[in-house]
Amino acid sequence: MKMRAVLCGCGAMAKGWLRALQSTDELRDAVELVGLVDLNRETAAALAIEFDLGDIVIGTDLDDVLERCNPDLLFDVVVPGARSQVARAGLRHGCHVLSEKPLAASMQEASELVRLAAEAGKIHAVVQNRRFIPGIRRLRRAVEDGLIGDLTGVHCDFFLGPHFGGFREAMDNVLLLDMAIHTLDAARFVSGRTPLSVYCVETNPPGSWYAHGAAANAIYRLSGDAVLTYRGSWCAEGRPTSWESSWRLVGSRGMITWDGDATFDVTTPGHEEGLLAGFEVLDMPEAPDDDLLHGHQSVITDFIRSIRTGTRPETASDDNINSLAMVFGAIESARTGLPVDLQAKEMIS
């Protein structure tokens, strides 16, 4: 039988969710969308017409729509400041909840949602769709296979200048909280290491059209004597990096670079005499032979399969909270000018 779902938050992001839900037979056969919720009823009604959703319940009060629809699932697509309230409502009404990122607007809220999901016996997961793209899966496989030896460094650069308008341009810590979470979660996934501490400098450069924190430089100490560096700006005009960042992985026996798109370069030491040994080029392994390589669609598929099989989704909130801790640790370090211990109890539950 199909699982009944309500989607809350019918702005621009919701269109990506609906396209994903309609993109495969598996998802079309698994999910029936029965309700839409938005503070602006006309926005929800327009979305229903655009995606030909038929006779669907539309409302502005989430609790009311959840009571009327009695859904199995809640898709949480609201702005970060409303995340906790919406996810709590879904869990309270007995729904499995899939939320947009970030998991929550604070570590305290995140810990509470993780606790509530466990008490309710429901799956709560987060849309970290960068985990489900071929490039990230290929990097993870290369590290697991020991292609460049023991991993010692992960270095990520992100430089773009998007003019979103809307809530992002009014947010505090906009780059770290709204975008860097993608790269940081992917780096944790690729490396397989535990983040231990962070030191961060955050700025809002001259010319920025954001209210706060459009640029950041962070250094993370990882388990196994590895280091992660993140350099980023959301007000960097000119030649951009990929939205997936550009990556350099350094290991004890070589390096991997990835432009965030289709170009990989794997090099190991060569045999030249003199100061530098030169390098040899290796083939980059393909992504693992699975079907979860399609970004947002694959996050939803993984979520649905987990509910059906009783397994744990890859982006479960009780794991994703560790990526959120990387973000809030960086924010705290930028505020205080001091390194922050990510293993402290107040950072990770």
Image (cartoon, rainbow, N blue to C red):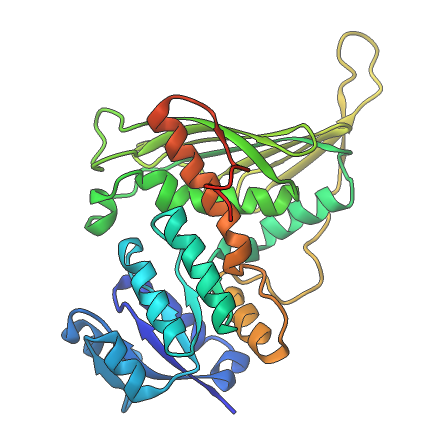
Q: How many marks?
A: 0
Residue 165 image position (x, y, % from top left)? 20, 48
Q: Residue at x 37, y 53 (%)?
A: 109
Q: Residue at x 20, y 44 (%)?
A: 170
In this rendering, the answer to whether 282 lies above or below 334 is below
Q: Which residue is situated farthest in the top direction here?
A: 274
Q: Nearer the viewer, residue 87 or 303?
A: 87
Q: Is residue 200 above or below residue 282?
A: above
**Residue 147: quadrant of the picture:** top right
Kindly tell me whether residue 156 is visible in this rendering: yes
For residue 211, above or below residue 44: above
Image-based side of 34 in relation to 164, left or right: right
Q: Nearer the viewer, residue 187 or 172?
A: 172
Query: What residue is shown at x 76% (from left), y 24% (from top)?
Result: 279
Task: Give how far across and how far down residue 69 sits, in percent.
Answer: 32, 87
Residue at the spot 56% in from the left edge and 36% down from the top edge: 247
Q: Quadrant of residue 258?
A: top right
Residue 197 location (% of width, % of height): 53, 31
Q: Tell me if I can see residue 18 in this picture.
A: no
Quadrant hosting residue 233? top left
Q: At which x and y percent is residue 50?
A: 26, 77
